[in-house]
Image (cartoon, helix red, strand yellow):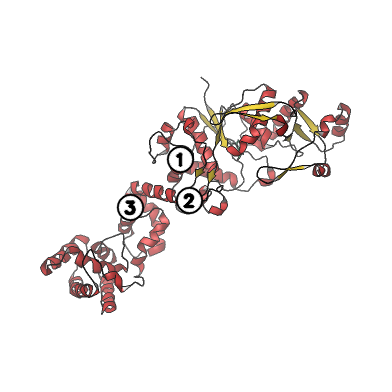
Amino acid sequence: MQKIRTRYAPSPTGRMHVGNLRTALYEFLVARHAGGDFMLRIEDTDQERFVEGAIDLINRTLEQTGLTYDEGPDKDGGVGPYVQSERVKTGIYMKYAKELIDKGEAYYCFCDKERLASLKTQVAEDGKTITVYDKHCLGLSKEEIEKNLSEGKPFVIRQNIPNEGTTTFSDELYGDITVENSELDDMILIKSDGFPTYNFANVVDDHTMNITHVVRGNEYISSSPKYQRLYDAFGWESPVYIHLPLITDENHKKLSKRSGHSSFEDLTEQGFLPEAIINYVALLGWSPEDNREIFSLEELIKEFDYHRISKSPAVFDIQKLRWMNGEYLKAMDDDKFFEMAKPYLESSLGDKFDLKKIAAKVKTRIEVFPDIEGQVDFFREVPEYDKGFYTNKKNKIDAAGSLSVLKDVLPLLESSDDYSNDALYAKLLDYATGKGYKNGYVMWPIRIALSGKMMTPAGATEILEILGKDESVRRIKAAIEKLS
Ligand code: GLU
């Protein structure tokens, strides 16, 4: 059997959109699952959309997510160059375009802007107006063409698609798709700057780079019959096509920048882990046989069967991703968690407290690192809070009861020198037993006094330990004053 070869073919136009990341991941998985090759090809022929630094961003993203490629700009596999602008220099696109001209499948077009503008425009499905070329230059004689070329008149090369008949191509998920040729326009293959269009380059490159499976967004479905005609014209076998469903936002609109979380970089900036992002993105359109949701990249490689990709749009649910990220944090090794949480802890608390202890407390309570501030802010300072917090049904305590407990424990805390959690816990338990109080009756008011919050990532004595004697005593005194 032929070795499976896939390619990720990004255009360096900015941040890595979640849709592009999914394409990269699926291409990677299709190859790895079958023991095949995964390639990176940079599609930079659209010079107007080129964004400085975008190639670095692509490389960094693939590195951070573990989508390693076997061949690419910096890893020659014998079918390079792997950057289209460098391929242009080899003359490969022009050579193949001329071959199509010889076969009558393409033609030179010298129409200027004015003439093109005067052509009737047609409204495309997405509301944009498109110009359908009228094949004017197909009627030029050989002599006229030669003359224009020798005079250096600017030209493009167009695909020649007959007005009659149909074209069929096949997609793994959608099956055979047949369109009327009259609906296909004579698209440009080579632009006036000598660069190929994506529409032409993708065919030439996928063939000459021995690509067997093409995974891409379903916005390419409508152009695929034209690509099929090119494969047929050359007598080449087309690759297996897998067109992926749309990714929408929570409002079922195409996921766009406006959502604030449409790119990999947006998500990492918001504190999401690359491995959680990859796991979540894997499920945007694909599902395993069981309901399992947590997958490492290794596990995805094992499980990923592209036949299980769905055709229905996938909704990007940021809450679900938050949940998933939280699962990754919980499972993370404590030291690694501390190392990653440290900058967030330091920005909230400086270096006043034992941050490692605090990290261990918040680890299971946050979904993303930026949640840390909301968990630990009270260590910095007790926020304004409502006296009503001291009333708690479960612990059968109210403000008056709280005041009396706090007055009792103040001297105990003042006289303690061992501020370890264990020692303090034993001491307070002793006091509770002596008074005939339930544990919670004592701990509740202390925790409120120390934190000003109903919910904290740590218990009363754990907070005492972290705050230390001076600060704890100061806070208990302030609470007594508040309640008095
Ligand atoms: N350069 C194209 C893009 O970024 C690639 C599409 C494809 O995978 O063929 O959308």
Tag count: 3
Mark 2 close to ligand 1, CB under 8 Å = no
Question: Which image quadrant for residue 458?
Answer: bottom left
Q: Residue 463 location in percent, x, y?
A: 27, 64
- Of tags 2 and 3, which is closer to the observer? 3
Q: Dot 3 corresponds to which residue?
A: 364
Mark 1 or mark 3, earlier in chain: 1
Q: Dot 1 corresponds to which residue?
A: 283
Give the residue displayed 53% in from the left and 45% down from the top.
18
Using the image, determine if residue 481 lies above or below residue 352: below
Structural distance between the alpha carbons of marks 1 and 3: 24 Å
Comparing 161 with 334, the one in front is 161
Element on which disc 3 rests? loop
Q: Residue 403 location in percent, x, y?
A: 22, 75
Mark linked to residue 268: 2
Comparing 453 with 143, the one in front is 453
Asked if the residue at tag 2 contacts the one at tag 1, i.e. Cβ–Cβ closer than 8 Å, the answer is: no
Structural distance between the alpha carbons of marks 1 and 2: 18 Å
Q: Residue 243 location in percent, x, y?
A: 56, 34
Comparing 154 with 227, the one in front is 227
In the rendered view of the protein, which quadrant contains the C terminus?
A: bottom left
Kind of residue sitting beneath label 3: Thr
Question: Which image quadrant for residue 437?
Answer: bottom left
Give the residue displayed 51% in from the left and 44% down from the top.
61
Mark linked to residue 300: none
Kind of residue sitting beneath label 1: Leu
Do we see residue 231 in this rendering? yes
Kind of residue sitting beneath label 2: Thr
* Left or right relative to 260: residue 98: right
Asked if the residue at tag 3 contacts the one at tag 2, i.e. Cβ–Cβ closer than 8 Å, the answer is: no
Q: Residue 154 location in percent, x, y?
A: 82, 38
